[in-house]
Structure formats: structure tokens, C-alpha cells
Image (cartoon, grey):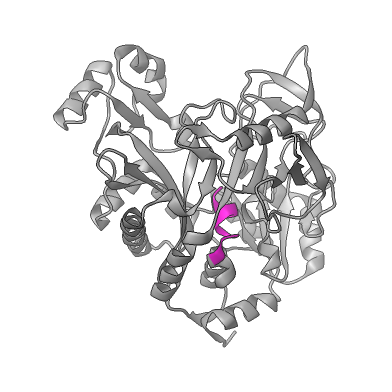
Amino acid sequence: MNQKLHGIAEIRTFFRTNTHPIYFVGPTAFNLLGIDRWVRNFQYVVYYDSWDSRHPRVFTPKNRATAEFESGEQINNHLLRDPEVQEHLRKRGGTPMIVMVFFDAETEEICRELGYRLILPSDELRRRLDSKIVTTQLGDEAGAPSVPNVLGKASSWKELKALAAENELGRDLVVQTPYGDSGKTTFFITRKKEWHKHAGDIVGRDLKVMKRIDNKAAAVEACITRHGTIVGPFMTDLTGYPELTPYKGGWCGNDLFPEALTPLQRGVAIDHVQRLGDRLAAEGYKGFLEIDVLIDLATDEVYLGELNPRISGASSMTNVTAGAYADVPLFLFHLLEFMDVDYEIDVAEINERWRELAAVDVWAQLILKEPADRVERILAAPPTGTWHLDDDGQLEFAGVTNDWHDVTHEDEAFFLRVYGPGDYRFKGADLGILVTKGRMQTPEGLTPRSHRYIKGIRSKYISEPLQDPPAMAPIAYVK
């Protein structure tokens, strides 16, 4: 394709007239839901049909496997090998372009076998960069510092204390292992008893041992392009609320609002993200990624947190912001990097415009996990679509809708169901995601409106105990 796009207007036209078949493959359609509004020929191939066949661009194979999956990668690889999926893609023609959150070397091999284009950085590169240890090292090299820390190993409580003392980290420590959901691989240790509780997950592994700070966490998505790193809006994390997740320190939602960061904090955080983006580009990475930053409430220092070199659970917020509608959603720049098209943009101008427009956006999302340590079969579940809080605070279903882009006020929300009737609910399982306008937390905790949404959605789940429940392991479906 000998074509060069000049500026945002031509980029918009390019995607509105796109002829390439592009598919998001995943357990659910959550992460890139709504991109089909912007990109012609964009569809979702998913394992869980949250709409019960009512979404015109969501395809789910009818013969769902009974296999017990242990990861999102396994689900995606199963979908790619499914005969119904392959036939669906064949009928639509062209060379399928495939994008997903979770993938591995097997995914790459399947796509090579089938002649699909996996439009993502390589699994080998992504896995290396996914390490919290590597992120820390690259950030330090780029001038984007992490919370005061030391990298090393500890085989005993005595060794951990010595490691922390040598680096003046104090006795109140945060210990992380390199890979995995932060809610399951981050350990708060202040005494010997807590060491013994987590030693089985720590001993023998590379560790990042950090000074524990009183912090505010913010998440931001960015896209590394040939013209530089475009930085999306910053949003605060909801973390560890027992109403939403059984994991202390586990991510369970986001608030996107103008005061998420002060202007000074935002400027420093953008600089950190761009520095890390430039360093990752030197490693060969391009396209979409998510970065967490931490603000020390005592010193106002801004630190680099974790890196997720992939599409993330924050994409739902990023793609409905004023910046996205002023230009195009951030993910479309990822597509441009992997499509056969040349383009010109002014990254500095886009970043400045999005920084200014951050003053008008307010969105929020809740990730509802099952907090109870039980396994039950779901008999009834809330349908996917728009829900309203009535004058008495009761949650009522308004109707099936395709996504949350038309949500306009705080008492209206979109709920995407993950597990439905016939599925199991168990500790840590992602039951669904709720997206709305307005904030879900304040410095004091979850807002009353947030509690009404949580209570309302959970009340719609009806399940039955099992005499001989199967062993179930939670899979991270959205982040």
C-alpha cells in the first residue's frame, strides 16, 4: 500500500474506510470494546458471549469446550484453533489481523500456521519486559526512577532484613516477585510472621524489595510510535477493596478524573512515561502498553511503578476520553504501527492537547471478582447492557447495549457480564465489569454510589452450592 496519511483527519478517514479484517481475540470483548465504532471491519472473537448473541460484531463458537483453562493465553489459543472460529474468519476473507491481551509463543505459532497476522510485539520481547525487575532496571537507565528499592534474593527473614538495612529501606517493606498479577505477587512484610506466611512465594526468586510508602497509584496507557510516545489520560487505581476483590493489593477498578494528579505531578509522570517509552523503543518495542506510577503522599515524589507491555484493563477508560474523541482512540495508533501504511503526526501536539482535555473527563470502572472462598454453579446472572440507579438507589436493567460509550451520567452504567448461567463462581473469579461516569472512590474509600452498584449487581447473581465442587483457579481476564 503506497499511501501516506497526513494528520488526524486522514487517519480517521483511513479507519472509517478500512478494508482489512481486524479481530480482537479474548475471553471477553472488554478491553477494546467500542473500537468497532471507529474501525470498519473490526470484530471480537470471544469465549464468553456476554451478550447472548445480541452483539452484531461479537462472535463466539457455539461448541464451547469443557476444558479447564489455566490462563488467558490458553483460552485465546483454543479460540484460534477452534474450527468454527477459523471458518468464520475464512468467510469474511482477507488476511486476518489478530490482536489480544494475553498471548505466548504457541499463539505466534498458530498464527503462522493459519496465515494470520499477530499485530503485537513478539512474545519473547514482551515476556522479558514484563518482569518487574527488568522494568525497574530500564526505568533507572532512562531516568524514570522507582520507589527506593533493592533487587536481590532472600532465603530467610534475616536475609530480607539485612538486604533492606543495607539499602536504608526501613522495616516496613513491599516485596515483589517478577511476574504475575500484582495482587498475587506483591507482599507486605513488616515482621517475621508475615515473612513465614509468604516465604513459599518468595524464597528462590528474584525480588524487588521496596520501602513502603504512603502512596497514590495512577495508571496510564501509552503507545510507542515511530514518531514518539503518545501518553494517554491518567487514572487512579481502586486497590484491595474486599467488596470487589479477595486479594490485598489487588487491582479492582479505576477512576479517571481531572484531579487524579496535580498539574506538577502530571508533568513529571508524563516525562517518566516518555522516557521509559523511548527506552523500550530502543529495545525494539512498539505499540500499546500500560504503566503504573506511584505518588509518594509524604514527599510528592512521582515514581515509576509496574509496566504491562500489552493492552490492559485501563483501555476501557482511555478509549472514551475527550482526547480520544478530539483525535482518535489511542489504540488506533497501535494499529497504524502494524499496518502497511505510512503516516505523519505531531506527537508533542497530541500530548499537549490530551493533557489539556484531561481537565474535563470523569469516568470510572469496577472489576467485580468473587470474594467468597467457595465454588458454586451460577443459576442466574445480570445481563450485559445499560443499568440505572433509581431514586431509591435500586439498580434496574434498562436494556441490552453494545458498549459504554453512550453512558452520560453517574446514575447510569454499563455492565459487562463475564460468567453467566451454568458457569462457576469461585474465589477470585471475574464476575463482570461495570463502567460509568463519575467517581467510585474518594480518599475515604468507596463512594455510597459505588456501594449501591456493587450491591445491586451482586444481588442479581443466584447460585447453588455443589456437593463435590471442582477445583477452580482464577484467570486474569482483563488486565
User: In this view of the protein, can residue 201 be seen by the observer?
Assistant: yes
Instruction: Quarter of the image for the C terminus: give it.
Output: top right
> Where is 194 relative to 17, above or below?
above
Indicate whether 424 appears above or below 411.
above
Q: Which residues are magenta?
A: 313-322
Residue at position x 69%, y 51% in the image: 29
Q: Quadrant of the N terminus?
A: bottom right
Nearer to us in this view, 154 or 348: 348
Q: Residue furthest front?
A: 391
- Frontmost residue, 233 versus 375: 233
Drawn side of residue 203 relative to residue 323, left or right: left
Residue 28 picture location, percent across and down: 69, 47
Residue located at (48% from left, 42% from top): 237
Q: Is residue 207 visible?
A: no
Q: Which residue is at 78% across, 37% downward?
A: 382
* Magenta-drawn stretch contains 320: yes
Instruction: Please name whichever residue, 415 or 33, is drawn nearer the observer in this view of the structure.
Output: 415
Residue 37 image offset from top left, x and y in percent: 70, 66
Please state if 302 lies on the left or on the right of 427 as rendered. Answer: left
- Coordinates of residue 117 in the picture (x, y in percent): 61, 65
| Residue 283 placement: quadrant | bottom left
Residue placed most toward the observer, 171 or 129: 171
Q: Position of residue 339 (x, y in %)?
A: 57, 73
